[in-house]
Amino acid sequence: MDTTGKRGKPSRKVRLDDIAARCGVSLSTASRALAGEKGVRPEIRARVIEMAKALNYSVPSSVAGKKVILAASSVAMIDYVRNQFTAQVLEGLHQRAETLGVEIVTQPVSGDAQGIGALQRALDDESVAGFLFLTLDDEEVLALTRDFGKPVVLVNGDDPLMRLSSVTPCNRSAARMGTEYLQRLGHERILFLMRRGRRTIERRFEGWQDAMLAHDAKDFRDLIVEVQDWLPELAADAIGARIAERGLDFSAVLTAGESLAAGAMLGLQKAGYRVPQDVSVMGMDDLPQAAFYDPPLSSVHIPMRDIGATALDLLLGEVNSHAAPARRIELACHIVERQSTAAA
């Protein structure tokens, strides 16, 4: 990589992802190797350190002892109270921050003048290295952060105009993966249970739709069931109402979140059906409690802790590199088979 332009002047600073790409490892692995964190094989650590030296890279000294503002949306705060997705993301984030010696300062944020003003005041604080926005879709806030002058990374969210860098799970391909898993079990009528609103959830809806279209499913548009909140009892009521109106016209359910899967199983059982003998149920997230449902829930595993850790790595890689284009990192997911799914 040529990091010098004409007349010997640097064309841009070497970034952490440059090191990762040269070594053929992930951004997260490169960060752990340079930080001396456990879990990296010695030969990989040596290769990363050698490459960093060759490219004159080091974690910017300005980052040591600095703060990162974690701006958490109201959606993130509600999720934190209700279930463990946000808690898992934050655990991964704080573990990485502790390893790198970075302080995380959490600040609730909204699109009103007071919330935005608090963020703008942090711009004048020299101890603030950058911002992480957790589960935020507010277009007004996203537009303003474009001119912050300090790096901003979206955590578990994305910017459709690619103004800001972001880290999310591969929501679309994850939902397609879950749907195709059910199709391989012989299921054709696969209900998709969701709450609309966030772009990340819309990507999951698109993934289910991709798989249904690829499988030449007939009349699957009537298999979308929406709820107004992520509460399990609302999912149970929605499933009960669907069966009361149409009968059991599906053999499997894929839900856009784990809490809805718990509710779907409850609704089916209340209607007199067995899981998975009569209907298979599959969730998305694979939260710790999934293994303790009755029956234990098959799910698409989302690498929640890695979302937080990778977001911080990406942010710190952008410190002092504001001219770099925004990047969207999507983390791979995988199927976890348990007892809530079976052959059609």
Image (cartoon, rainbow, N blue to C red):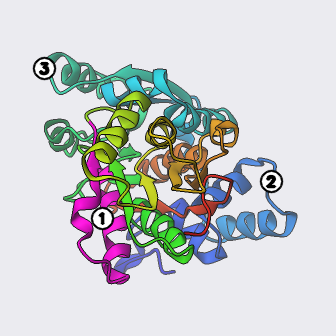
- Please indicate whether residue 198 sits to the left or right of residue 77 in the image: left
- Is disc 3 in contact with disc 2, using a CB cutoff of under 8 Å? no
User: Relative to 52, does residue 292 appear above or below in the rendering?
Assistant: above
Q: Position of residue 213 (x, y in %)?
A: 30, 78
Crowd around label 2: few <14 · some 14–19 · many ≥20 (10 Å) = few
Between marks 3 and 1 in the image, the one whose residue lies nearer the viewer = 1
Task: Look at the numbered disc 3 and give the secondary structure of its residue.
Answer: helix
Q: Which residue is more in the foreground, 214 or 122?
A: 214
Q: Which residue is more in the foreground, 323 or 195?
A: 195
Magenta portion: prevailing SS class? helix
Q: Amino acid at mark 1?
A: Glu
- Please indicate whether residue 315 sits to the left or right of residue 113 in the image: right
The structure residue drawn at horizontal position 59% and vertical position 68%, both measured from the top left corner, is 19
Report the disc number at residue 113. 3
Which residue of the protein is positioned furthest toward the right in this rendering? Answer: 42
Task: Look at the numbered disc 2 and give the secondary structure of its residue.
Answer: loop
